[in-house]
Image: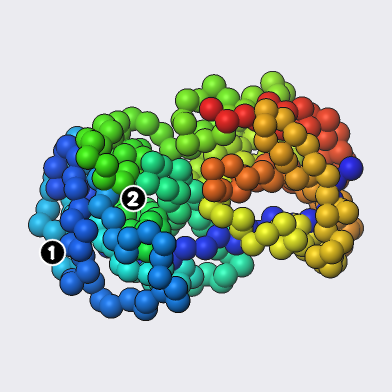
Amino acid sequence: MFARCRNSLAAGLAFGLAGCTDKDITSYRVPKDAAVAAAAPAPAPAAAPSAPATMDLRWAAPAGWQAQPASGLRIASFAAPGPDGTSADVSVVTFGGAGGDVLANINRWRGQLKLEPVTAAQLPALIEALATPAGSFSIADILGGSAGGAPATRILGAWLEVSGRVWFFKMMGPQPAVAAQRDAFFALLRSVHPDAGVPAPAAAATTPFVVAGADQSDSASLRWQAPAAWRAKPVSAMRKGSYGVGPEATPADLSVTAFPGDVGGLAANVNRWRGQVGLPELEPSAVPGATETLTAHGLTFTLVDCAGTADAGGQRILAALVSWQGATWFFKLTGPDTVVEGARPAFLSFLQTVQAP
């Protein structure tokens, strides 16, 4: 059987300010110390990194992006065209160390969009992961409110730690412009790689970031085959897969998400899930006994089953987590107890279709 838990993932990494794009439509090389003099001093790491303090990165700017002067903290700057003459601002900056506190940086961005700050417990719902040749990016997609008939402002931000530095790629502009250039932005991120004396890969602007199922070809994502009876729902910046399961009147929700690192560890995630359905926390020593494992295609899943209390609305969470390429993937089924129980065999069969590309 499974264990009982709650879904609230803790993802780390710091956010900085700025926009992102490249100076040319071809590959772009960042000098090792280009941003050091311009950037505000960052606290030195507690221990010297094992790799050099800086590293050249290369990337390819999408076709149609217009290079802008890279002033101030910016290593590269672009205007990404949107509909009706609008455009989004894209920037690349880098800092030594970890680049600050992720919560503070996300709330700074939210403040730019006149949104209320979030708490640390809300961070997992705001952060996505993307594997690239340079490492795993953490990504946030933040939409502001609209006023006076003007379109809302949106921020797409991504950050990556490599060789003792943190790199920030950020797109900001009117929602229609950012939406139009979203796939191009993720193609830019996928093209980022350490400089090894070879050209950067082409940044195909048509390649989407999210993966909805096993028939997709994104090499940065796991693949799977959803049961025919599950109803595919729109994916988002956070969800790599999304399905409605069970009766349409009272469906359960199936989500697939991924975050860098171990996301706080097994005990923290199990107890967050338990809290969501009104169950008490388990001592860390008791968590392994409340879980089960399943192995398929070389992946080992940890399974958790959290049947909630009546006070929590009789909800149930059936979830599995698996580590792959430096990130933790979560497959989570949430809904009424009876619906989740009925979908349990299909959920287990679904997990057995999950595989690396």
Q: In the rendered view, does 88 fall on the left or right side of 262?
A: left
Residue at the spot x=40%, y=70% of the render?
Answer: 48
Question: Residue 225: x, y in percent?
Answer: 64, 24
Q: In the rendered view, does 295 fall on the left or right side of 73?
A: right
Residue 290: which numbered mark, if any? none
Which is nearer the N-term, disc 1 or disc 2? 1
Query: Which element is circle 2 on?
Result: helix
- Name, please, the residue furthest toward the front: 50
Q: Is any atom of residue 335 visible in this view?
A: no
Disc 1 to disc 2: CB gap under 8 Å: no
Report the front residue among 272 and 132.
132
* Residue that mark 2 sits on: 175
Q: In the rendered image of this protein, does residue 331 appear above or below residue 41?
A: above
Residue at the spot x=45%, y=54% of the render?
Answer: 138
Q: In the rendered view, does 107 fall on the left or right side of 250?
A: left
Q: Is any atom of residue 120 visible in this view?
A: yes
Question: Residue 118: x, y in percent?
Answer: 52, 69
Where residue 98 sits, quadrant-wise, is bottom left
Residue at the spot x=80%, y=41% of the render?
Answer: 293
Question: Residue 110: x, y in percent?
Answer: 41, 67
Q: Amino acid at mark 1?
A: Ser
Q: In the rendered image of this protein, does residue 237 appear above or below residue 12?
A: above
Q: Which quadrant is the N terminus positioned in?
A: top right
Question: Residue 131: x, y in percent?
Answer: 45, 43
Where residue 330 sits, quadrant-wise, is top right
Where residue 95 sits, quadrant-wise, is bottom left
Q: Amino acid at mark 2?
A: Gln
Residue 71: which numbered mark, if any? 1
